[in-house]
Amino acid sequence: MNRGKTEYWTTEFGLGMTLFYGVVAWWCWRRRGELVQTEEVPVAARELAWREMLRRS
């Protein structure tokens, strides 16, 4: 059965899926500034503080 160019657009490796994910990724990237900024300490700093606390005890 010859499906022509249909499989280039509709399969999991097709352009339709690629374009859809590309648009969603672009949309998320454009809205990244709307995320709430937290005051969370980076993991490396927490690890360092933990090691320092263990060393003192």
Image: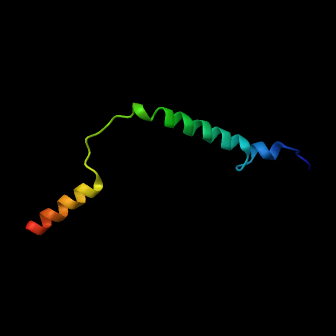
Task: Please give left or right for residue 54 compared with residue 37 in the image.
Answer: left
Q: Which residue in the rendered view is the most extreme toward the right? A: 1
Q: Quadrant of residue 3?
A: top right
On screen, residue 32 above or below 43: above
Above or below, 42 against 34 in this view is below
- Residue located farthest toward the left when viewing the structure as drawn: 57
Q: Nearer the viewer, residue 18 or 2?
A: 18
Residue drawn at 85 percent across, 43 percent down: 5
Horizontal side, residue 31 vs residue 8: left or right: left
How is colour applied across the structure in the image? rainbow
Residue 31, how many percent across, how many down?
A: 47, 32
- Judge from the rendering whether residue 32 lies leftward or rightward of residue 51; answer left or right: right
Q: Looking at the picture, tell me which residue is in the foreground, 37 or 10.
A: 37
The quadrant where residue 6 appears:
top right
Q: Is residue 19 above or below residue 45?
A: above
Q: Residue 42 placed where, x, y %?
A: 28, 51
| Residue drawn at the location 18% of the way across and 61% of the way down | 50
Q: How many marks?
A: 0
Location of the C terminus (image quadrant): bottom left
Give x and y (percent) for residue 15.
72, 43
Which residue is rendered at x = 54% and y = 33% of the image? 27
Residue found at x 55% / y 40%: 25
